[in-house]
Image: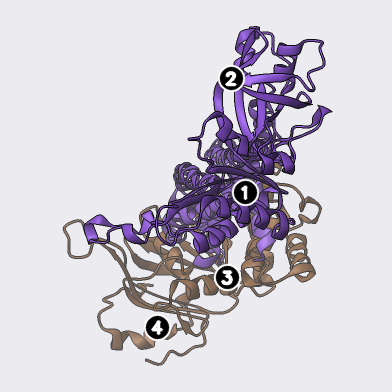
Chain colours: A purple, B brown
Amino acid sequence: MKLWQSIRMAFQTLLSKKGRTFLTMLGTTIGVTAVIALVSVTKAQNEANKDLWRKMSENMVFVSFYSYEWKAGATPNAVIARDLRDYINNDLTELAVGITTNQQEWGSSVRWKDMIVQARALFYGSEQFSDVNRYEIKYGRDISVVDIERTNPVAVLGSLMCDKIFSFQDPIGETIYINEVPFTIVGVYHQRDKDKPEWYTEEQWYDYSEDNLIVLPYTASRLINPNVIIQDYKIKVEEPDAALELVSLLNDFFSTVITRIEWDKIDWEAGIYPDWDSETGYYNAWTNFQWFEEMDEAEAAQTRFLTLIAAISLFVGGIGIMNIMLVTVTERTREIGVRKAIGAPRRTIVTQFLIEASVLSGAGGLLGVILGFTVTLYWGKLQYDLIAQPDLPITFIAFAGSLAMGIIFGIYPAIKAASLQPVDALRTE
Amino acid sequence: MVYTGGALIEIFNVYKIYNEGHESEVRALDGVSLSVSQGEYIAIIGASGSGKSTLMNILGCLDIPTYGEYILNGENVCHLYDFELARVRNKQIGFIFQGFNLLSGLTAIENVELPLIYQGVHGAKRHQMAMDALDRVGLFDRMDHKPGQMSGGQQQRVAIARALATNPNIILADEPTGNLDSRTGEHVIQILDQLNNQGTTIVLITHDPSVAQMAKRRVRIKDGRIVEDTGLIGEPSPKDALLPEEGAAEGGGRSDL
């Protein structure tokens, strides 16, 4: 008997008992719908999280290093800083936009004449501070290389800070005092942060706005506080993919100038101790994109868990199919008897019932795929306001799983049907 | 053992015993021997519980005897596997049941095609053979009707067409008129008569003497033994020659006539 004929007959049989067929399919349908929707929406959500993370990370790589200059053989910090800047600006122009020191002090007092205001942040920056942090000059000029080399006492203000101190007055050329050290204002940045939201009071907004800042050449830090040690840097890369590459390049760079203790290789219990004598400092380079790997791992674990749940519900659906197929075999004992009497071999009967079971589960699975796609699109839109793409591999796996489940759970009823003796089967009323 | 006579059906000393050795032992067939030649029209008559249904099941290869041998068209069918029995039923035998036993989901022509499908006949040829069979029972114009849309007599004629479709050597009819009124029953009997005239061997199982009258040979069965066989008059059956060798079949197949 040809396969398509058997399938057509299975469809006819199933259609003759629509209610029962539908209810039996429901188990498989729900299982498949659940797995497609859950996995797809989870993936879409994770992807959206990554996008947000990417935006927030602003393509940054962070560097922190400190060389123990007093130790024999240690490279001076200033030399490393200069080499790092040259390395970034000369050799890595393809990858990096710029480098600035990332040293800051929070809540510094700034005095102009009799007026004292709090700057949210006081940055010790390089000439690339504005490039890295997306500030743009509105009036005057930016911090320059010369300022840094000569330790010029100059300052650039953020827009909010400028408004607060000077209102309508031209700030360029005015002198402000930080820790009673005079600095000349040479420039003002454009507003970068958003306008003050209504729910903030003006005072609160001064504490939050990224436009409430003041930037000094990093070498000028010693004018204010001789103890400040510059050790944090920030590098902006052209695109997210470059971040991880840059991290590995920076590790290579630092390993030639600083010997640090590899803490992940220390195993106190196994008797592997740090070699304190060889240590000449520490360094670290990292990016938020490193979290992506962990996010991917978490997502994989989530997917495995959801798939397990779906497998369980498919299993339950399969048991439902087996149950209904056993009922069907009992109901159709006489039909089986007739078929056997007129010459149907065991194999044909087994095939017939297996096909019926798999058509049942396959149709349930197909309905599940349609529902799963619909739910994915709507749920993704409603809950997370994002376009969730149905995940195709999981769709395939879920559908194949439902089909396999029908065949596996159809085997027992099918064999039971085929094993009926024609005499006994025909005797049944 | 050499079987002679070229008969279509030959059974020797057939026993069908349920729960053998227990107190509840039932001997449905108690040493039956029977020989049916090609082209015969034979009725097996008996009250219910006489063993005639068991005999029919064994003749139809639906059941296997506990003891004894069954040679069908030269092939010993007592030791065949399930799939081989299915093949024998499919090719050699056409069944007609009391309750028609058509598949309700299929049309008349699809019902008639079913045994041909199991035989592996394909496409247009199968359709043609099924149409010919329906034509022979006069239901050519009803081939797209489902059993539910037909009268009992028509359903039984579809069943006959199904039995005929594979051109079997034997048609086994188990109370074919049992569920029909006398007029339609007569019609069915007429068709069987015609088939026999065209050369098909017919074995009719019935408890109705008037139906049995139509057959050319009548075998009466009682308590699992043949008690009357009109076919034996004047023509010695091959089994008579074998009886002394068998010995064990004490009077089993012997007719007292």
Residue A367, x across and y down, in percent: 65, 41
| Crowding at mark 4 (Cα within 10 Å: few <14, some 14-19, many 20+) | many
Question: Relative to the observer, which residue lies in front, B108 or B229?
Answer: B108
| Crowding at mark 3 (Cα within 10 Å: few <14, some 14-19, many 20+) | many
From the image, which quarter does the N terminus of chain A lie in? bottom right
Of labels 3 and 1, the one closer to you: 1
Give the number of the disc on residue B90: 3
What is the distance, in whole Å, between disc 1 and disc 4 at their CAs? 69 Å
Residue A285, x across and y down, in percent: 54, 50
Q: Secondary structure at mark 4?
A: helix
| Crowding at mark 1 (Cα within 10 Å: few <14, some 14-19, many 20+) | many
Of labels 4 and 2, the one closer to you: 2
- Mark 2, residue position: A180
- Whether pointer 1 and pointer 2 mark residues with C-beta atoms closer than 8 Å, the reply is no
Q: Earlier in the sequence, mark 1 or mark 2?
A: 2
Of labels 1 and 2, the one closer to you: 2
User: Disc 2 marks which amino acid?
Assistant: Glu
Q: Is any atom of residue B176 visible in this view?
A: no
Give the number of the disc on residue B239: 4
Give the number of the disc on residue A224: none
User: Disc 1 marks which amino acid?
Assistant: Thr
- Mark 1, residue position: A395
User: Disc 3 marks which amino acid?
Assistant: Asn
